[in-house]
Amino acid sequence: ASTLKEVLAAQIPEKQASLLKLKKEHGDVGLGMVTIDQVIGGSRGIKTMMWETSNLDPEEGIRFRGLTIPDCQKKLPGYQKGGEPTPEALIWLLLTSEVPTKEQADMLTADLHARSKLPAHIEPLIRSFPKDMHPMTQFAAAVAAMQTDSKFAVAYHTVNKKELWQHAYEDILNVFARLPEIAALIYRCRYADGQVKKDLSLDYSGNFCRMLGFTDPTFDELMRLYMVIHSDHEGGNASAHATHLVGSTLSDPYLSYAAGLCALAGPLHGLANQEVLGWILQLQAEFKKAGKPVNKDTIEEFTLATLNSGKVIPGYGHAVLRKTDPRYEAQRQFALKHLPDDPLFHIVSTVYEVVPGVLTKLGKVKNPWPNVDAHSGVLLCHYGFTQHDYYTVLFGVSRAMGALSQLFWDRALGLPLERPKSVTPEFLWSQATKA
Ligand code: CMX
């Protein structure tokens, strides 16, 4: 069978030719006008970036290279027959748009394991971080510090730019391979004995779970599903966009993804998964103290109190989605199968019955439905993974697969520096009064 790199190398000339033709023959076709509202409203809905690894439909949710999450669960090879798809299989799909065979996915597992050794300074660096430094700060710093190993950065000065994609490929695969150990080191140093034990006889997720210190095979399955559903969410979200933007300066994949991680660390984006669990635990503790039952009425009261204090309900709403996130639904199905009686799962389910109605009544929230972050923490907690200030790191290990698969194609297609035009408020007023 061909290796991943061979498959990609064979695809590049045709894709380059197709893009050139599109640009040459149809480059002046308009894609809609831009309003003042969009310019001051966070660019919502402006079509301004090409992203091929996934696409987000407001109603249906995400498709990875055309496949929905249930399609991926059916078609991508798992670690065990009939089990959840593996991240390795998804990486293959995201990069090549082809569903890999089990043999191809296993070949990629072996390649990632072979690339997984960290540069010598990374472990001491992580051990030197203050214990109270947020895990996402540690993660972004450690990924940036691995840049000493970038083949792309060296190649920029030594090879023809047509060849740069090969070096981007090496860096990207090395980042995928090394993120789990970095993440595990941060976890073990902060919450446990600082020791990380690999098991390279397992797949990418299984080995990651062992390094974190978890041994339940059902937790391995959860991690496979978790990583697949968090991998990519088209290009406009802040972590993917930041990676793409920084990469467009020909900054290497390590630095580009460190930028993506910094974006993911914001509470309106990836940090929402830690905020959700905090909110649910606070709800549980307050109700217990006041002797209140957990039901729809009490949860509605708690939701209103959060909103009245000027805060958002974490895990609800989305900039693009207008229905329940299929990533939420996939996690709900996992919970119904594996932990139907878990008390925190019951709270999450009751919150789902209440919050959309409350947010709808506010009249301004465009999407009152839950997103991916509303469910993930409760699943992790069930298996004893309770340190919620760490959860966004798991999101960060996963998001690399989408953001960096696209970054590969950015470089293979030779996409230019991203540099949109900004305008002054005076310009906007001048246009407004002209209209
Ligand atoms: N709770 C309370 N208010 C909310 C809300 C929520 N969950 N979601 C949106 N709103 C409010 C907005 O704050 C905004 O209010 P103001 O006009 O007073 O500023 C108004 O509704 C309109 O916002 P919107 O157009 O519906 O949403 P945006 O596209 O601007 O923002 C998002 C999207 C995700 C940032 C927002 O829904 C939010 O803050 N949700 C909670 C945080 C969260 O779960 N983030 C994770 C998203 C998924 C991910 O990236 O991981």
Image: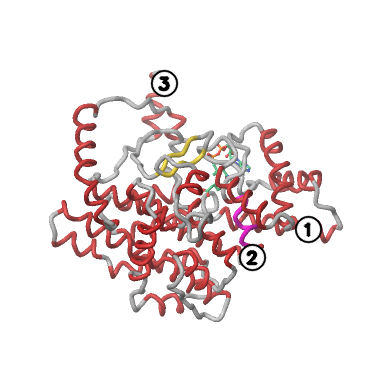
Q: Residue 258: name its quadrant.
A: bottom left
Q: Secondary structure at mark 2?
A: loop
Residue 433 - label = 3
Quadrant of the rendering where the N terminus is positioned: bottom left
Image quarter of residue 433: top left
Q: Is residue 395 above or below residue 412?
A: below
Along the polypeptide, which appears first: circle 1 or circle 3? Answer: 1
Could you tell me which residue is drawn at 43 percent across and 29 percent down?
36
The vertical placement of 10 against 126, above or below, is above
Q: Tell me the kind of residue under disc 2.
A: Tyr
Question: What number is the disc on residue 286?
Answer: 1
Q: Are marks 1 and 3 in contact (CB under 8 Å)?
A: no
The residue positioned farthest toward the top in the image shown: 435
Secondary structure type for disc 1:
helix
Q: Position of residue 388 (x, y in %)?
A: 60, 63
Label 3 or label 2, whichever comes before in sequence order: 2
Q: How is the image coloured?
A: secondary structure
Label 2, residues with CA under 10 Å away: few <14, some 14-19, many ≥20:
some
Q: Nearer the viewer, residue 266 or 332?
A: 332
The label nearer to you, 3 versus 2, is 2
Q: Give how far apart the Cα atoms at labels 1 and 3 are.
A: 53 Å
Which label was assigned to residue 383? 2
